[in-house]
Image: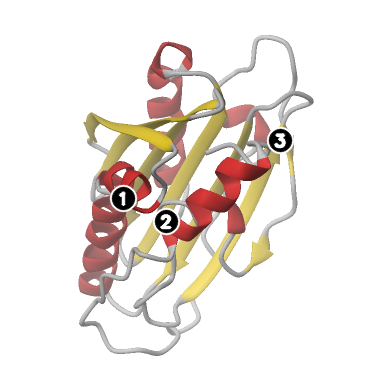
Amino acid sequence: MPMRTRAGALTALTVAALAAGTILTAPAGAAPRAAAPKFLSASQLPPHPSSAWTAGPVTDGFPEGLGFCVSTEGVPAYDYRHREFRTDLDTSAVQLTVVTGTAGQAKALAKHYDDLIRTCADRIEESSPDIEAEGRSYGKLPVEEGARVRGLHTETSWGATDISLMSVGRDGRTVTVVEWGQMGDFDDAPVAAFKKTTTTAVDKLH
């Protein structure tokens, strides 16, 4: 969901995100310090037809822009960092990296995040009757320990439409989530380019 979505839809989807409370069984606690994961650069995002991408700084913590489908609810206090990207228009993106304690914890976390994205459309419709949502799967990618790409389209009763592409990938004990979004529908989604972005994001983590 793009960060510049209309205020009404933003509020409704934030409420929906709070309902995503699946709990992992991994023990709480920050992961041991290791080399920090590397992030995407602006040039590695799906090209925009009329605006260049601008990359923000790498920042500690969980990004608000991912809170519609993915959250830290019920997840141990791992090492969260993120980077936000923007264009001069309505298109935006964000990348999250999470360093866990073990590869097993990372595998469980990646599945948890993918499950949240997979079920996000249903949760949105359950919590927000004025929003219609549809999710689609765009398959797996053979990079490191694997990645999966999904899409989400929402339309409000007042006519606002938004399209998002989201992916979850893993390299060892590090998980990354990438989200791209703008106003529009599935026909406007650069799926092939986003798959390339996801592959790059996972491949360059370590």
Res 35 visible: no
Please tell me whether residue 79 is drawn above or below residue 203 in the rendered image. Answer: below
- Neighbour class for label 2 at 10 Å: few (<14), some, many (≥20)? many
Q: Residue furthest right?
A: 88
The residue under the point 63% across, 36% down is 5
Circle count:
3
Residue closest to the eye, 76 or 143 = 76
User: Pointer 2 and pointer 1: residues touching (CB < 8 Å)?
Assistant: yes
| Cα–Cα span, label 2 and label 1 | 8 Å
In the picture of the structure, the residue carrying the numbered disc 3 is: 86
Q: Earlier in the sequence, mark 3 or mark 1?
A: 3
Element carrying mark 3: strand
Q: For marks 3 and 2, give the CA distance.
A: 24 Å
Q: Secondary structure at mark 1?
A: helix
Residue 16's disc is 2
Q: Quadrant of residue 77?
A: bottom left
Q: Nearer the viewer, residue 103 or 185?
A: 185
Residue 16, percent from left and from top:
42, 56
Mark 2 or 1: the one toward you: 1
Q: Which residue is mark 1?
A: 126
Name the spot of residue 49 as percent of width and height, x first. 65, 9
Residue for point 40% across, 39% down: 166
- The image position of residue 194, as x and y in percent, is 44, 27
Residue at 23%, 51% in the rendered image: 145
The residue type indicated by label 1 comes to Glu
Label 1 packing within 10 angstroms: few (<14), some (14-19), many (20+): some
Residue type beneath disc 3: Arg
Q: Residue at x 35, y 89 (%)?
A: 28
